[in-house]
Image: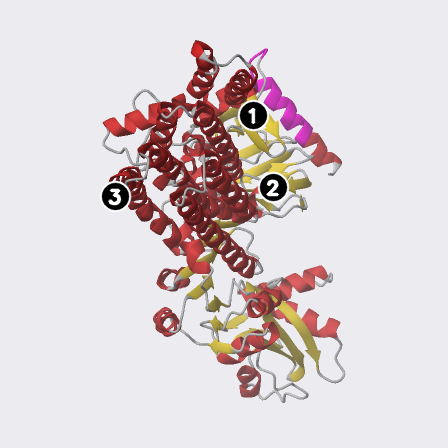
């Protein structure tokens, strides 16, 4: 930072401190700023709750994992000081104390049962610690079951566990009844920790929107709500603070942490003139910037909006599990009743007590928690993992569609290429060098504001070549420029003026500006759109993933489009397309299989909406971002194959969990009916399967 910039930044910081009332400290807007409450807090596995929500008293009828998702920010802040950390997982201290006490009481009951006096009333001594342990571990389950019964929604895992354990107490199996409820609590704790971890990874994105900003007001820095910052306002950002609005830096230079926004772990160097986005963090410098957009229209606001809507659309496996759970529990209860009643009635030697106990075991085995948790949690974790990489998915249904993608179509300009003109080469005629050619071109283009003219004058400025002033200047629309004795334009212009063009290549894949002076041809400047970094790698990775076809859609002329496609490794090119032509081409691809379209412009919005999965670049037009199903915040084409790869991985995890849960439960149900199982086996089939499914689902987050 220059001395002038340093002094200005220092003065700005001092002014901000002076503007605060005595004794008060300015808001820091640090990266741990309390996030806004959004729909990301919604329950991740609706089937588990059977549609129940929090009652007026604030108690949840859901399982512990659902309760973890339904906590609002006030609850999170209250619990923050009472959480016990286990690596990247955290659990409330109160819940751990309850579990530890219940486990100790259960152990005391086991000790009294096996070492204490037997016979007479002494045989009831273990009942007291077993009942106490059961009450501590099972009271939330019993309470939720009772509330759901009163609401007419009895058929859930709370009901199954309550009936099974109460029946075990009635059958004299105190040790197993209390033990099953305690180990069920272990499963609930692990579920809560896993879901909370996934939730925190997504909620961290909600912290991208700082609540306040320091704005220059009459020469004094005052703190105000970020939502009140208007375009053009000057904003002060201190080291370690989040940038509250999108803006361009006026004073200061340093490094900015954009990892939460883009997934890029390396700091980004910025200086005066650099554009910065809201939600990024100034690491080591005081920055003064001019706001470009309001907070509601910033990149961070777009991300928050996407995250809040990400759970609205369920994937097919989620819809299947939700529908399946509605029928699964009643069928299991009926099967348990038949198991308890029919054998003693039909088989004279069958004892009712034995078959009643088997029915209780069946109820524990059949608890659907592993089914209703694993699938939504898998998608929840998958969306969270993608969001960490700067890939925002608007719902699980789109993640599920991505894994089945067979065709990927790309817009060209702004998606695979940068969308800005750059000088690609200077082709000089014999007897002319590059300096003379460029100097003459800069002189001709000095007064034009055409993008091609800007590309030429910018290159001249970079090489220390100025265009001068004065002289005749005529803009020949559609042809070029006549500046005194200099002609700059297309080939036709020079030929019409009688200039003989020599040694010009035949390659028309780029835009060419032909230059002549005093009727003598000096050479031509080739100008083309530059490929976006990673475009060729993205196409290669898509092919490696087994994508059948990659296609380029563009409104550009065929020769430049084919040249760009050849460089990037795309075989199929559809050029010179109007927006309606793109829709027709997309319809053709969609009929042949699941198709992904990647674009960024307003004219891409209809195609993004028509494709099976629309992917928009985060810096693209608002219409494109709105129409898309997936947003790539980094504008990096390599995120497209990464999104498909992660979608396939997530789907694979969900299928693994579903097959594993159903298969394991089926085996244990068969063993129970044959009399080869007990309550401890039932516990393994329920809690054990759920724990394995949860741990497996959490892999999608990584």
| Element carrying mark 1 | strand
Q: Which residue is mark 2?
A: 249
Residue drawn at (42%, 28%) of the image: 72
| N-term mark: 1 or 3 | 1
Q: CA distance from mark 2 to mark 3?
A: 85 Å
Give, as a single range, the part of the protein colored magenta.
9-23
In the rendered image, which residue does mark 1 sit on?
221
Query: Within 10 angstroms of label 2, few (less than 14), some, or many (20 or more) residues?
Result: many
Would residue 468 be visible to someone looking at this image? Answer: no
Toward the viewer: 397 or 472? 397
Determine the CA span between mark 1 and mark 3: 87 Å
User: Residue 417's quadrant in the figure?
Assistant: bottom right
- Tell which circle, 1 or 2, labels the residue nearer the N-terminal end: 1
Residue 211 lies, with reference to residue 455, above or below; the image says above
For disc 3, the neighbor class at 10 Å (few under 14, some 14 to 19, many from 20) is few
Which one is in front, 13 or 418? 418
Residue 95 painted magenta: no
Element assignment for label 2 = strand
Q: Main secondary structure of the magenta part?
A: helix
Q: Quadrant of residue 606?
A: bottom left
Point 46% across, 29% down: residue: 180
Q: Is residue 528 above or below residue 288?
A: below
Residue 15 on the magenta segment: yes
Residue 584's place in the image compared with 95, above or below, is below
* Number of dots carrying numbers: 3
Q: Residue at x 71, y 33 (%)?
A: 6
Q: Position of residue 487 (x, y in %)?
A: 60, 77
Residue at label 3? Answer: 346
Q: Residues within 10 Å of mark 1 (few under 14, many from 20)?
A: many
Please state the horizontal and vertical placement of residue 108, each as a whole percent of the image: 54, 16
């Amino acid at each position: 930072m220059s001395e002038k910039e340093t002094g200005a930044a220092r003065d700005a910081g001092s002014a901000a401190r002076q503007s605060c009332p005595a004794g008060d400290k300015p808001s820091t807007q640090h990266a741990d700023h309390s996030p806004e409450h959004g729909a990301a807090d919604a329950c991740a596995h609706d089937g588990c709750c059977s549609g129940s929500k929090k009652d007026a008293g604030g108690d949840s009828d859901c399982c512990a994992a659902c309760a973890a998702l339904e906590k609002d920010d006030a609850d999170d802040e209250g619990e923050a000081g009472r959480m016990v950390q286990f690596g990247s997982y955290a659990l409330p201290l109160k819940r751990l104390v309850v579990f530890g006490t219940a486990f100790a009481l259960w152990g005391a009951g086991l000790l009294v049962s096996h070492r204490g006096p037997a016979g007479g009333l002494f045989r009831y001594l273990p009942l007291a610690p077993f009942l106490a342990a059961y009450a501590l571990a099972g009271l939330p389950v019993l309470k939720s079951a009772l509330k759901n019964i009163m609401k007419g929604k009895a058929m859930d895992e709370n009901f199954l566990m309550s009936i099974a354990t109460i029946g075990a107490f009635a059958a004299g199996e105190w040790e197993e009844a209390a033990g099953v409820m305690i180990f069920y609590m272990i499963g609930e704790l692990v579920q809560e920790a896993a879901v909370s971890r996934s939730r925190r990874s997504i909620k961290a994105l909600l912290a991208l929107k700082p609540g306040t900003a320091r704005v220059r007001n009459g020469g004094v820095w005052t703190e105000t709500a970020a939502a009140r910052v208007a375009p053009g306002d000057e904003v002060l950002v201190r080291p370690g603070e989040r940038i509250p609005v999108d803006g361009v830096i006026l004073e200061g230079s340093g490094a900015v942490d954009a990892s939460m926004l883009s997934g890029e772990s390396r700091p980004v160097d910025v200086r005066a003139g650099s554009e910065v986005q809201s939600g990024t963090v100034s690491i080591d410098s005081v920055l003064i910037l001019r706001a470009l957009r309001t907070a509601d229209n910033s990149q961070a606001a777009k991300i928050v909006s996407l995250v809040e809507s990400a759970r609205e659309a369920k994937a097919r496996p989620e819809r299947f599990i939700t529908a399946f759970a509605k029928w699964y529990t009643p069928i299991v209860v009926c099967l348990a009743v038949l198991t308890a009643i029919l054998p003693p009635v039909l088989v004279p030697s069958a004892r009712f007590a034995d078959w009643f106990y088997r029915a209780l075991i069946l109820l524990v085995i059949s608890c659907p928690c592993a089914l209703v948790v694993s699938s939504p949690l898998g998608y929840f974790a998958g969306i969270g993992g993608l969001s960490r990489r700067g890939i925002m998915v608007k719902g699980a249904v789109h993640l599920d569609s991505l894994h089945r993608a067979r065709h990927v179509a790309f817009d060209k300009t702004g998606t695979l290429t940068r969308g800005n003109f750059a000088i690609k080469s200077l082709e000089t005629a014999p007897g002319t060098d590059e300096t003379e050619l460029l100097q003459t071109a800069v002189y001709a283009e000095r007064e034009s504001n055409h993008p091609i003219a800007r590309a030429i004058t910018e290159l001249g400025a970079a090489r220390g070549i100025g265009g001068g002033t004065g002289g005749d200047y005529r803009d020949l629309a559609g042809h070029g420029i006549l500046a005194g004795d200099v002609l700059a334009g297309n080939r036709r212009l020079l030929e019409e003026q009688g200039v003989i063009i020599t040694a010009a290549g035949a390659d028309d894949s780029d835009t060419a500006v032909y230059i002549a002076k005093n009727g003598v041809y000096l050479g031509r400047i080739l100008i083309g759109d530059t490929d976006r970094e990673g475009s060729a790698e993205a196409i290669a990775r898509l092919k490696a993933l087994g994508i059948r076809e990659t296609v380029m859609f563009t409104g550009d002329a065929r020769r430049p489009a084919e040249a760009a496609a050849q460089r990037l490794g795309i075989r199929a090119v559809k050029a010179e397309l109007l927006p309606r032509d793109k829709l027709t081409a997309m319809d053709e691809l969609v009929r042949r299989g699941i198709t992904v379209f990647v674009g960024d412009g307003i004219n891409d919005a209809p195609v993004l909406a028509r494709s099976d999965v629309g992917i928009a670049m985060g810096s693209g037009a608002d219409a494109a971002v709105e129409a898309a199903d997936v947003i790539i915040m980094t504008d990096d084409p390599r995120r497209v194959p990464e999104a498909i790869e992660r979608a396939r991985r997530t789907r694979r995890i969900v299928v693994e969990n579903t097959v594993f849960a159903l298969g394991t439960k089926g085996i244990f149900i068969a063993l129970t009916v044959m009399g080869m199982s007990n309550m401890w086996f039932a516990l393994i089939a329920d809690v054990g399967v759920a724990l394995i499914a949860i741990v497996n689902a959490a892999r999608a987050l990584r």
